[in-house]
Amino acid sequence: MSGAPTREVARRVFADEFNDASYTFKESDDERAPVYVLLPTGERANRIFVVGTLTETEDVGEDSEYWQGRVVDPNGDTFFMYAGQYQPDAASMLRELEPPAYVSVVGKPRTYETDDGEVNVSLRPESISQVDEATRDRWVVETAERTTERIQRYEGDETNEYAEMAREEYDLPVENYRRTVVGALESLEEEQRDESEATV
């Protein structure tokens, strides 16, 4: 095996769980060690994979371009992402895309504390691609499956150190995210039903 660091698996997560993931940690003291965000369902994430509707883009930079994008998942919850000079490909995608558009985003979670002590979570995109509706639908189904698996491990695996950490760090019922899964799948079914009725 080579000593090159392997890329972390990009976790699929719905926006409301991602936005609740305010606790970050490293697994070693090495300054190059990856920073993980702790998902409330008991999983660490160094990279996130999102597919949703890009609803808004805005250059919020003062001296140089710094693009903000909002991506909405089927529950209507928002992922915020920011790309500047260090993410030139992602920044140019945000500059060029015309919302609304389906996009897939792979990025790093970032947390920052606001003046009133709230912790906000955003994505620093590594890549942004425009995709079709079928890709978005597949992401919803797969994210629902992954979230359900995390919840089952959280509830059933006593040795799950990240679930233990999540219980300590978050005072959030994991039931919330089961409702998120159900809501996402129901909204998908509703969309598909509306579309099939529209084509009749």
Image: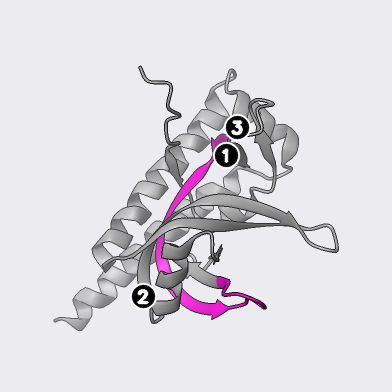
Residue 8, picture quadrant = top left
Residue 73 appears in the rendering: no
> Residue 154 at what x, y percent from top left?
56, 31
Task: Give the magenta range.
Answer: 42-67
Mark with earlier residue (1, 3): 3
Foreground label between 1 and 3: 3
The local secondary structure at tag 1 comes to loop
Dots 3 and 2: beta carbons under 8 Å?
Answer: no
Q: How many marks?
A: 3
The amino acid marked with disc number 1 is Thr
How far apart marks 3 and 2 lie (CA) works out to 35 Å
Q: Mark 1 points at which residue?
A: 41
> Residue 126 at what x, y percent from top left?
45, 54
Which residue occupies 37% across, 55% down?
Answer: 140
How far apart marks 1 and 2 lie (CA) works out to 29 Å
The amino acid marked with disc number 3 is Ala
State the quadrant of the C terminus.
bottom left
Q: Is residue 111 left or right of residue 154?
A: right
Q: Residue 101 carries which label?
A: 2
